[in-house]
Image: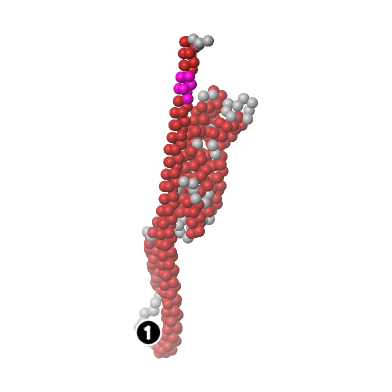
């Protein structure tokens, strides 16, 4: 039997619809592939920039270490000269004491003789009043103290204006700002985990879950791992602050290298995380639960998207090496060892590009 015209048109329309659907899916797939290529190219470019900056930091660190060695050598030379001058003054003082004793012995007999001869006649030489002598000694001691304080003030002023004091001030400021920023970031990540991640995990295990465990993992990614690493880093940082002003932070910054790879995974999947969150918000039970969690006092009116974006800002600091470079500059004195800096550079050069 020959099929009718209407049947033929129906089949043709179905074929056209399937063709259009296939074309749309192919276009969407091409867009996804193109976006992946773009993100991969951006990631490679960021890694190249990070490697270049680490090389610059290496040169800078070597120059500052050379300058530090020169400063230490000059300090040793000046200290040795000062000790030599003190020895010379001590020797001169001993000689003066010996000369004074001999002088007193030589003039002691003539003085007694003159005193015996003039005991019967009125004295022509005025005697010094003991009260006046005490006043003179007080004035002399006050003047010596004033000279000592003035000299000490000059030494302190010179040190305050020296390059070493300026670098120490910069170091202190950078370390304090790093501690404050790390403490604030820890607070934000703890709110994300305790107020959002854990409640959603508990709800996903219920009988009628508004979302699945897969959705929760896709939304929050590796936030719990990031929080754990930063807690370890902050604990080590605060323990080192107890030995202020002597700081040895090189081994702590070795922790930043694995953090980079973890943050890179977070950044690559961040767009997909927000997309899954938007799709889950279409469900009324999920939206109600999310609104109830966001209304908590600890959130301070901030949404879940805001908390999910905080690691992105932290990644910006890590990927350009800002935290590492600042901390290296801040502990350049006698506190950073060369082998630790070399280990950090070699670890950074092994990062995937």
Q: Could you tell me residue 181's position as x and y percent?
A: 47, 44
Q: Main secondary structure of the magenta part?
A: helix
Q: Quadrant of residue 153?
A: bottom left
Residue at x-position 56% and y-position 31%: 215
Residue at x-position 37% and y-position 84%: 122
Q: Count all numbered tags in the image, as a single digit.
A: 1
**Colouring:** secondary structure
Residue at x-position 51% and y-position 44%: 261
15 or 39, which is in the foreground?
A: 15
5 or 110, which is in the foreground?
A: 5
> Neighbour class for label 1 at 10 Å: few (<14), some, many (≥20)?
few
Q: Residue furthest front?
A: 1
Whether residue 9 is visible: yes
Give the magenta part as a residue range. Answer: 15-22
Residue wearing tag 1: 122
Q: Quadrant of residue 23?
A: top left
Residue 21, placed above or below residue 309 = above
Q: Could you tell me residue 37's position as x and y percent?
A: 44, 38
Q: Could you tell me residue 18's position as x and y percent?
A: 48, 21
Q: Residue furthest left?
A: 124
Whether residue 19 is in magenta: the answer is yes
Whether residue 44 is in magenta: the answer is no
Residue at x-position 46% and y-position 54%: 328
Q: Could you tell me residue 333's position as x and y percent?
A: 45, 59
Whether residue 131 is visible: no
135 or 52, which is in the foreground?
A: 52
Instruction: Say which element carries label 1.
Output: loop
């Amino acid at each position: 039997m020959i099929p009718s015209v209407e049947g033929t048109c129906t089949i043709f329309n179905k074929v056209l619809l399937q063709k259009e659907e296939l074309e749309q899916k192919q276009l969407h797939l091409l867009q996804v592939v193109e976006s992946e290529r773009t993100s991969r190219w951006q990631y490679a470019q960021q890694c190249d920039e990070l490697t270049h900056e680490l090389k610059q930091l290496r040169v800078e660190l070597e120059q500052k270490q050379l300058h530090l060695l020169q400063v230490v050598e000059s300090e040793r030379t000046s200290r040795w000269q000062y000790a030599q001058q003190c020895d010379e003054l001590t020797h001169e003082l001993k000689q003066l004491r010996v000369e004074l004793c001999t002088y007193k012995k030589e003039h002691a007999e003539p003085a007694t003789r003159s005193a015996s001869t003039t005991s019967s006649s009125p004295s022509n030489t005025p005697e010094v009043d003991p009260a006046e002598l005490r006043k003179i000694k007080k004035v002399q001691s006050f003047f010596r103290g004033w000279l000592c304080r003035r000299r000490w003030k000059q030494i302190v002023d010179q040190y305050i204006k020296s390059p070493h004091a300026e670098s120490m001030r910069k170091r202190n400021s950078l370390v304090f700002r790093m501690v404050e920023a790390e403490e604030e970031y820890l607070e934000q990540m703890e709110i994300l985990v305790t107020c959002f991640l854990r409640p959603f995990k508990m709800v996903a295990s219920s009988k009628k879950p508004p979302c699945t465990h897969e959705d929760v993992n896709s939304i929050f990614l590796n936030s719990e791992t990031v929080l754990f690493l930063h807690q370890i880093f902050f604990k080590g940082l605060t323990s080192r602050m107890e030995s202020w002003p002597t700081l040895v932070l090189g081994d702590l910054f070795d922790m930043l290298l694995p953090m980079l790879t973890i943050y890179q995974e977070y950044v690559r999947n961040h767009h997909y995380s927000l997309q899954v969150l938007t799709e889950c918000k279409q469900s009324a039970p999920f939206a109600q639960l999310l609104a109830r969690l966001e209304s908590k006092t600890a959130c301070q009116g901030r949404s879940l998207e805001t908390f999910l974006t905080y690691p992105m800002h932290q990644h910006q600091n890590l990927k350009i090496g800002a935290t590492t470079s600042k901390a290296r500059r801040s502990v350049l004195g006698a506190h950073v060892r060369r082998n630790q800096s070399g280990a950090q550079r070699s670890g950074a050069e092994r990062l995937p590009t």
